[in-house]
Image (cartoon, rainbow, N blue to C red):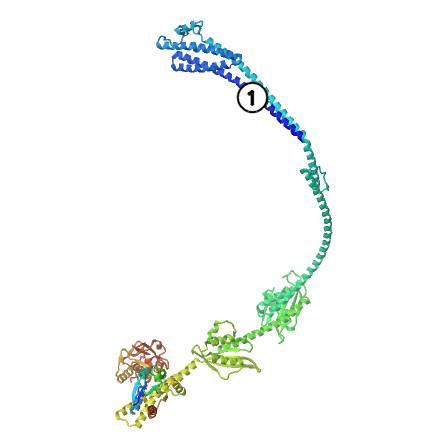
Amino acid sequence: MASFYVVLATLMISSLIVYNYTDTKLQATRAKLEDIRDRSARAGALWEEWQDVQFNMRGYALMGNEELYTQVMAQQDKIAQQTDWFEKNAIYDQGKAFAQSSRELYQYYFDAILPLVQSYVKTKESGDITESFLKGTTLAELPLGQKLITEGKIQLDSQGNIDVLSEINKSELALGGYREFLEDWAQRTSDQLEQEIRTTQLIWLANIVVLIAVLIFFIYPFIRRITIELLSLVKNSQRLANGEDVLSVKVPNRKDEIGILALSFNQMASSISENKQHLLAKNEELQAQQEELQAQQEELQAQQQELEEALELTMRNEQHLQYRNDLTETLAARESLTAYPEIIEKLVTITDSEIGALVFVDEEESYSVVTYGMTDELAERLLQNDASLLKRAESLKTPVHSSKQVASNHPLPYPYYMYETAVPILDPTADDIIAYIYLVRYRDQFTNEQMRDVMSFSRQLSLSLLRMRLFDEMTREKTKTERILDSIREAVIYLEPGKEEVFVNRPLYDLFPELRYGVQAEQETLQTCLEVIQSVVDEPENFSRYVDSVLRGELPTDSLQFSIRNETVFIQFYVEVIHIHQVHKGTMLVMRDVTKETEMDRLKSELVSTVSHELRTPLSSIYGFTELMLNRDIEESRQERYLRTIHSETERLANLVNDFLDVQRMESGTQSYKKTSVNIHAIAEETTHFYAASTQAHRITFRYEGNQLPVIEADEEKIRQLLNNLLNNAVKYSPSGGAIDVVLTTSRDQVILQVRDEGIGIPKQSLSRLFEKFYRVDNSDSRKIGGTGLGLAICKEIVTGHGGEIHVESVVREGSLFTVKFPLVQSTHVTIS
Amino acid sequence: MARILLAEDEDVLRMLVLDTLEDEGYTIDEATDGDEAYQKIMNTEYDLVLLDYMMPGMTGIEVIEKVRQHPDKQHLKIMMLTAKSQQSDRERAEEIGANYFFSKPFSPLELIDVVGGILSDHQVD
């Protein structure tokens, strides 16, 4: 390796030297060439200048232009410079010759010619010379010219002109020679240069070649070794890659990357080989296992096949069972009625039939049918046709089968067989048929299994139908009972022992509307009912005590009377127990709305109380005064007073009794009127006058404003009573006096009587109840006045009994107006009383 | 002589009682309704009050109740005159503080006797 570097170094250094040398040489030659060209150029330039000077000189000589002279002077300088240069720097002979000739020319021209010309010009200017064109002879004739000629600086030519040309020609010649020489020299130098360049190139080439050779010489073996080793590795790798067995490569004794690579390769190769063995072994093992597995798999498949078959069978059975269950369930459910189409469909499916029907017979022996797969026409025939299977089943009361060859083309292309079966379903309690099952198959007969299905189904159907009938009957009965209970007026709660639900009827809801707002069901619970009732009962303790004893079984002998809703409704409550065959079936709680009766009773007792109270006062006074009169000595005036009092009190008593009796009669409806046509003008007037006379505190007037006779169909006595009541009230209820007006008038078809007072008036809230029996306005003013509360009730009774109306208007503390209207009678027959 | 208050709304009865008792020499004040009766009782010392049960304004019962609330009227003798004669009414009257009970119709002579008896007791006290 070291020698390689040495050689390399040597080569490089020598190259450098050679480079340097050739370069210098080339440079010199180039410089030389330059120089030659430069000289040539200079010479050329100089000559140009001479040409130019001549031109200018001629011009100057001709025109005498000072400018030209100046130019010539400048040019002279330049030429002088160049000529100097050549003189100094001419190397070659030719050059020197040229320099000399240039110098001579210079001297000739500028030292001689130029001054001459200058003199010529000056002379021309002064006018001494008048020629337009320069003549050479002229110049020679000039004094300066003469001088110069004498000095020998100028020559004359054959014509006597100044000889300029010969000098110039001389110079030109020299120049030409010089230039030629230069050319030649340049060419030679150039050739030399080329030669040198070529030499250099060759040297370079040689250099390179040597270099390459050296490199190759040194490097090649090195590379080759590596290449061999690499190739070996490559080859082996390829072999390894291809799967051949490769053990190892020769490891070159090198410590570098190739060595490492080779080592690694060996390791890899051995490792791979190992793995390969390993894998092969494993592979064999796996193969063995795989064969085993395959065997197992085949076995499993065989088992699976078996299972699938079993499963299919199970599924079929299950479906079969499912159908049967469905049927059973459907029948068991209460809504069987709507499910019959489904049922017959299922039955047809189970038995693999084509068509089927369920025929029902009701209590009136009429048929209804539910079909599957049958047309209506077919169904009709089944029911109506005497020869149909159904009829045979009916008469035999057992299942019947038939098979026949069908002669028509429908539904299958014939000939085909049709297998029918009709199964009657009997009511087990009676002996009559309640339904039929009818099925048809086309292809083959019904199997035993299928028939078993049908028979079991028919039994179920029978029970189901019966149950339905019973249920219907029960529902009907129940509805009947409900209707009955709803139709009575009493509210009923019927409870059965052990059940929380109770039966209630409609009147209970009427009585207790709150029940409706609770859980709405057909059944209420006892709890809810009692709760609701108790919530509105005025005295819940009594009620709950009564109920508790009932529920305990201690039946009260009396009914309970209680009120609800703050005594707005009164209820009579009693209990009845239902026994059937000595068994306690249920208990009925009955509530009767006795509000009216209670009210009536109350009113009656109030009336009696009021009347008796009212009776006592006159009785007291009559009794008292009479006793006084019997047991004391009373003076006469007092006696009279007493007697009058007794008299009026007796009258009061009598009136009271009469009123009371009137009311009783009206209550019991035994009041009768003796009606005739009566002109009530007179009655009204009379009554008014009577009252007017009886009181001094009041101004009682009567007025008639009608334009017809106020004739009505009436019981005169009753009308009097009416008027009396009204006027009595008017007086009684205006204790501070005032006016009382009685106005009688007629309209088109009515007689209108009005009684107005200026008394204490009637409160607004009392107006609607004023005509009620025993109703008395309850304020301090009215209570003071007293009364039975019957007066206006009697008035109303009378007025209504005569086909009329009575109204009241009133303002408290201002007075009241009572208006009575009767139908007017157009009559010529009038009773005037 | 004893001073008696008569509270009665019926004129004829008032006249009866008045005549009956005045001749005996009692001084009789009259009241025609419960409120008037109450006022008079509070303002005057009476030896006996004859009180009707049913009167406009305050009823006799109400009057007694109110009167008995006053400590100084605890010993005031009150007799109820009433058309109500049931046992329950008597009991009620006694409960609230009526001392005597007289039902209508009554005999004036009997009234004189009873009133005399009451007032003589009073005088003795």
Q: Chain of mark 1?
A: A
Q: Residues within 10 Å of mark 1 (few under 14, many from 20)?
A: few
Q: Position of residue A165 (x, y in %)?
A: 46, 9
Q: Position of residue A691 (x, y in %)?
A: 28, 84
In this view of the protein, which residue sits in the foreground, A578 or B90? B90
Q: Quadrant of the C terminus of chain A?
A: bottom left
Q: Quadrant of the N terminus of chain A?
A: top right
Q: Is residue A340 visible?
A: yes
For residue A257, which quarter of the picture? top right
In this view of the protein, which residue sits in the foreground, A579 or A92? A92
Q: Position of residue A752 (x, y in %)?
A: 30, 78
- Identified by mark 1, the residue type is Gln
- Residue A162, relative to residue A672: is it above or below? above
The residue that disc 1 covers is: A27
In this view of the protein, which residue sits in the foreground, A752 or A437? A752
- Residue A579, relative to residue A28: is it above or below? below
Q: Position of residue A25 (x, y in %)?
A: 58, 20
For residue A369, which quarter of the picture? bottom right
In this view of the protein, which residue sits in the foreground, A809 or A385? A809
Label 1 SS? helix
For residue A57, which quarter of the picture? top left
